[in-house]
Image (spheres, grey):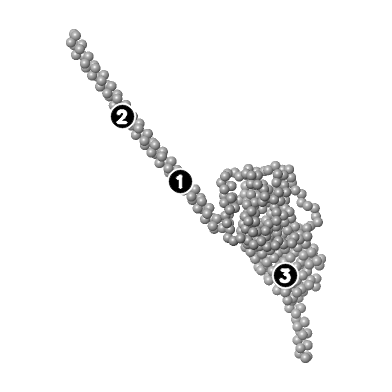
Amino acid sequence: MNGGVLFALSTLILVPAAFPCPKECSCDRQAKVVDCQGQGLYDIPNELHPETLELYLQNNHIRGISSTAFREMPQLQVLNLANNSITMISPRALLELRGLRSLILANNSIRELNRRLLGSALNLTQLDLSYNNIAGLPGALADSFHHLTHLSLHYNRLTKLDRTHLEALETLEVLHLRGNPWKCDCQMIGLKLWLETFAFKGGVVDAVACTWPDAMQERDLRHVPYELFHACMTTSYSYLFANIHHLDGQRHPLHGPQPWPSPKAPTGPELGLSAGMPMQDCEAKQKPRAVSLRHAIATVVITGVVCGIVILMMLAAAIYGCTYAAVMAKYHRQLKKQQKQAGEEVEAGALGREEDKEPLENAIA
């Protein structure tokens, strides 16, 4: 019996040592979950165990995340930092979190995202950046997230979104874009086509309500008629190839899951929207890269066919021109020959008349 008591006491002593818990937090040692939400924290606790799988830090006063904040937690899978005051995140903050699946940064004061920060979290399936001040996304978004299924960008400062940022997200199922001051000009045609294809495949998307120009204000980009974008098309070929990309089938349909519950909206004033501005010309943009090998091969085949047709037409025109020139040259040679023969006959007739005239004159004499 004394041995059993000693074993129980040793277990009680060793369990806290095996999984220490910060005093401001509550911990589930079996599930390896640390809950520090709503504790008035200004920094991320230091006494976090390396085997932590889920960390909840929402509803605090954290303003920045250093490069060493999560270095000792390589197994972390869920990180919730919503409803803080975060303005700065070190590009190396997520470097060690190779197994991170869910990252929630909603309702903070983030203005921009470093491409190196997103490039570290290669296995993310859920990314929530809603209710921030983000005005643009880095190009690494398409290169880093090969498993992303949920992306939330609603209520930021996005005015446009390049289609190439989304085309490589082949596993995406849910996309939130509502509440941004979208500028529905020529550069949004690609996004319109992608959204229609995404919804057709079963993807879940809320709305892209235009705030500019006045003719499209409060209208969902997906429902704006293409006639309003015809002035943006510089040539008929650009419109043709845009529709080829739009109608090109993808690998497999998506299954639309239920969208996330939206976090608490900020209490600050709404973003100002510009209105009454005339439609401006399209700005020059980089040529989009091929989204897959199949698209690249199709482009090469189409280009080859067009070039072949052009070469055949040029060859036919050259043959026709040469044949026409040869026929005309032969015609002119025959015409000159006939004229020459006619002249010789006229000269011979005149000479004969003169010879007949001479004997007659001699006889009279």
Horizontal relation, residue 50 to residue 345: left or right: right
Determine the CA span between mark 3 and mark 2: 103 Å
Residue displayed at 33% across by 29% down: 335
* Dot 3 and dot 2 residues touching (CB under 8 Å): no
Q: Earlier in the sequence, mark 3 or mark 2?
A: 3
Judging from the image, what secondary structure is the residue with disc 2 in?
A: helix
- Name the image quarter holding the C terminus: top left
Judging from the image, what secondary structure is the residue with disc 1 in?
A: helix
Q: Can you tell which mark lies on residue 54? A: 3
Q: Earlier in the sequence, mark 3 or mark 1?
A: 3
The amino acid sitting under disc 3 is Glu
Q: Which residue is mark 1?
A: 311
Determine the CA span between mark 3 and mark 1: 64 Å
Q: Which residue is mark 2?
A: 337
Residue 101 screen position, x and y as percent: 68, 66
Residue displayed at 27% across by 24% down: 344
- Residue nearest the viewer, comparing 176 with 97: 176
Judging from the image, what secondary structure is the residue with disc 3 in?
A: strand
Determine the CA span between mark 1 and mark 2: 39 Å
Residue 53 placement: quadrant: bottom right
Residue 37 screen position, x and y as percent: 78, 67
Residue 337 screen position, x and y as percent: 31, 29
